[in-house]
Amino acid sequence: MEGGPDLYAVFLQRLEDLELPYFVTGSVASSAWGEPRFTQDLDLVLSLPATAVPSLIQAFPPDLFYVPPQESLLAEAARSEGGHFNLIHHETGIRADVYLSDDDPLHTWAFDHRCHIELSPDLSVWLAPPEYVIVRKLEYFAEGGGERHIGDIRAMIAVLGPRLDSDVLHDWITRRKLGAQWKRIGDG
């Protein structure tokens, strides 16, 4: 992963220790599946029941990390969709954008198909499946995200080739009504 595993291990090792289901997505995942590019932000999807909020706060001590107050985390965990918060490592300034899993069928599918990969001899992490990463990048592009999402998708397709499950990918593109954005990938 571009930027080096040590930059992200400060977050990921703690999540591994908590044994909360999660996966890495966004630019870090597209770099792992495609062409590496630098990013200082780490995007995660996390399953966070309200009962685990105190453990999460303990795992990210305030002298090392910015962590939202417990009340804010509980409110985000209680949301039926769109729960989100940030963790920031004080020393490096690296931010983890944490998106809470919800009843979205795409999240459910991704949790069932996430990949456990070794970042270093001391750290293995859960990575979103490439089809999920592509669909989410198409959604971000549709919402007005930059051309970098298109470039990330093209790089993933070039690197993965037939290892991508095209049936699954096209099913999600159809279900999420992303045909016009997908066509843009082929137009480049």
Image (tube, grey):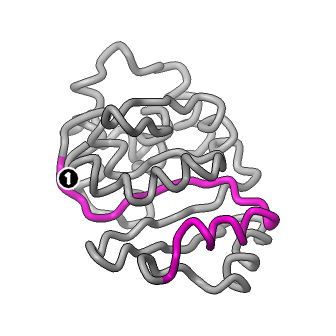
Nearer to the camera, 74 or 53: 53
Q: Residue at x 40, y 21 (%)?
A: 164
Tell me where residue 89 appears, x and y as whole percent: 37, 73
User: Which residue is at a point 38% across and 31% down the rendered structure image?
Assistant: 118
Picture quadrant of residue 187 = top left
Closer-to-camera residue (68/103) = 68
Task: Give x and y (percent) for residue 49.
Answer: 78, 60
Question: For residue 47: magenta?
Answer: yes
Asked if residue 109 lies in the magenta stretch, the reply is: no
In this view of the protein, which residue sits in the foreground, 123 or 176? 123
Give the left or right position of residue 10, taking residue 156 as reference: right
From which residue to which does the magenta span run? Answer: 37-62
Within-10-Å neighbours for mark 1: few <14, some 14–19, many 20+: some
Q: Is residue 144 shown above or below 4?
A: below
- Foreground residue, 172 or 107? 107
Q: Position of residue 144 (x, y in %)?
A: 37, 67
Report x, y in % for residue 111. Answer: 63, 38
**Residue at 62 percent of width and 73 percent of height:** 57
- Residue lying farthest to the top in this orientation: 162
User: Which element is circle 1 on?
Assistant: loop
Q: Please report the residue visible at 18 percent of the width from the left and 55 percent of the height from the top.
A: 38
> With respect to residue 85, does 43 lie above or below?
above
**Tag 1 residue:** 3
- Number of numbered discs: 1
Q: In this rendering, would 87 be left or right of 31?
A: right
